[in-house]
Image (spheres, grey):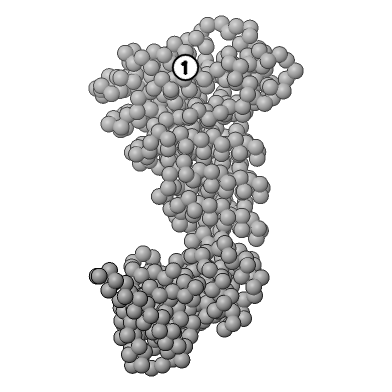
Amino acid sequence: MSLKIETLNINKEKENNDFIIPLILKAIEQHLDANELKALLRGCLKITLVTWKDEYSLDLLHYCILHNNIVALLVLLNQGCFKPPYRPAAWPYLHLVACLGYASLISTIIQEINFQNEACMLDWDVHKVYILPKTNAVTSVLIENFKDQKFTPVDIAAIFQHLNCVELLLDFWQIQRSNSNIHVVHNTRNSSSYLALACKVNSPSALQLLLTKYSEKKEALECAIRMLSFDCVDIILRQMDGQAVKKAFQGMNLFHVTFTYSCCLTDQQYEAMVETTKVLIKHNQNVNSMQPSRTFPLYSILSHSLAGIRMEECFHFLIDNVSILLKAMADPNIDEIRMEEETKDSEESTAFGRQPYSSAVNCLLSNIAVLKRNESFTQIAVKSIDQYSYYCIKLLLKHGADLLHTGKFSSFSRNEGSLTDVYHHGTSLHLMMSTRPIGQLSFSVLRLLLHSGINADACGAWSMSFYVEAIKYALNILPLSLWSQSITHPHSVTPFSDEDLKCFIYISKFMSQSSLVGAYKEFLDAVEFFRALAKENNILEITERFYFENNQMLVQIIKQYDKVTKEPWTLQYCCSNIIWQHCKRKKKSVLALPIPAPLKVAGMFSHKKQDLVDEKVVH
């Protein structure tokens, strides 16, 4: 019996709804006053008002918007209908208002339902049936292109050419961001602020519409670059002349700003950085710009500091940026340090965000070492850094990086974890060895350098604490950099490992006998000096661990030196050295020789046939 009564009540309610809802819709359409509408609403349950939908999933609040009826909209909202967390099944309310251009409704909806400038996909059949008859602003052909895209309310207002709605929505976005302390925004309504805000919300459509009214683009360009809004950058650069562009960022080139000051916290933002680089190339921005000092684009991307994202997620985006610059003829052999010294550049000490570098390879190796200093990195992260370094160097070599170049480079300190103002001199091999105190060397990268033309015999000048003589040979920097660190920072000593010994032995294979003799003497002189220093100053246990006979690694190094300097070289080894020097220390030149494969292997000081194929990064 009770089931029949319940069914009867449901049927009566349905009949009542079928009668009341059309009356409510008619009242909304005819803009009846609030009292008449409230009288109708009293005959209908709140849940019925909220759950009713038409065939396109539009609800009663949608109909209030379609008929631009702010009275009906407020009556429904005051009844507690359609308030958060309720979400409409069809078009979000703010999107619909923006599409129709009803600016008077925007404030009410934002204040009552909250402002969310979310991008979402829209049902364009709703536009065809309900909106197109009211406004013929956008053709059906254009609508067809929108079907798979997401749009924010700002985008929609701009697409349908409602400039006043765009400005109003941007004002509310600015207020919301300011109140939440997420981002510092403009608090004045001047001509440049709207253009900049369009870039901040990354709405190219809004930017294009606003440019029909406002002309000052400098602030907008600066904002678009920082936010990596590459489509906005494209639009602005199309309308700015070269002199106007140079006024942005106090004359810094836009590549440097993109790589140094932009917001990169996600892989999507790193992808946007790549697209921004492409846009700058498209608009003929100079990839070899060197003024002001320390803003050369290639070195700015190679010295880019990670922020909020792991290297394994973003390194391919960094490589893409490097590749784009190199293909656009960026020079990997610019010596910023030498140029500053020659020109006595008054800006060299200005804080533009990074150190100067003497070559692209030096820049990369310097910053890879600093990245590795982060002791919280997992082994996977460190391997990703090595991968990035390896493939980046291959790319630089492909585009003419000169490994024979000798230049200045800065000191490293494990405690500081950054470059200091003290310069050493040498090849990229000297620099790489000097980074050992703050990070393990990559054998794959070392092998790549040695197989690609770097001169292991080259002399440089590397200084270390307490020792008046400069170390000339890169081979000796590897152990001495660690052992020198033990004196200045005894509690942060990194042991000389088996992997270090492997690198030491491998470098020695690519040196001539005369250089090895000189290097051995240099090494023994340094060891004797520190032994004497230890005895004289009673330093000490830590120093003794490195410079006295009970150090097994010291024994191994001396054993290797004895082997390559005191024992006669075999005829094959002598020939290998001659072949290697004749081929300018390049693996590809050895492989091109018209000789049997075993001799090619010997020519590369190897007993492994796999050295004949391209190296792979060690995983």
Q: Is residue 127 left or right of residue 63?
A: right
On the image, the x and y values in percent for residue 116 come to 41, 69
Q: Residue furthest front?
A: 1
Label 1's element? Answer: helix
Q: Is residue 370 left or right of residue 299?
A: left
At x 48%, y 13%, the residue is 561
State the residue position of label 1: 521
Q: Label 1 is placed on what type of residue?
A: Lys
Q: Nearer the viewer, residue 480 or 57?
A: 57
Above or below residue 35? Residue 446 is above
Above or below residue 53? Residue 262 is above
On the image, the x and y values in percent for residue 242 come to 64, 66
Please say whether residue 71 is visible from this viewpoint.
yes
Q: Nearer the viewer, residue 89 or 70?
A: 89
Q: Is residue 544 left or right of residue 110?
A: left
Q: Nearer the viewer, residue 274 or 481?
A: 274
Query: Can you tell which quarter of the image residue 447 is in?
Result: top right
On the image, the x and y values in percent for residue 488 come to 32, 32
Please say whether residue 536 is visible from this viewpoint.
no
Q: Residue furthest right?
A: 594
At x 29%, y 30%, the residue is 490
At x 52%, y 68%, the residue is 122
Above or below residue 182? Residue 454 is above
Q: Is residue 74 left or right of residue 617?
A: left
Q: Residues within 10 Å of mark 1 (few under 14, many from 20)?
A: few
Q: Nearer the viewer, residue 163 or 67?
A: 67
On the image, the x and y values in percent for residue 595 come to 73, 15
Query: Can you tell which quarter of the image residue 498 is in?
Result: top left
Above or below residue 147? Residue 448 is above
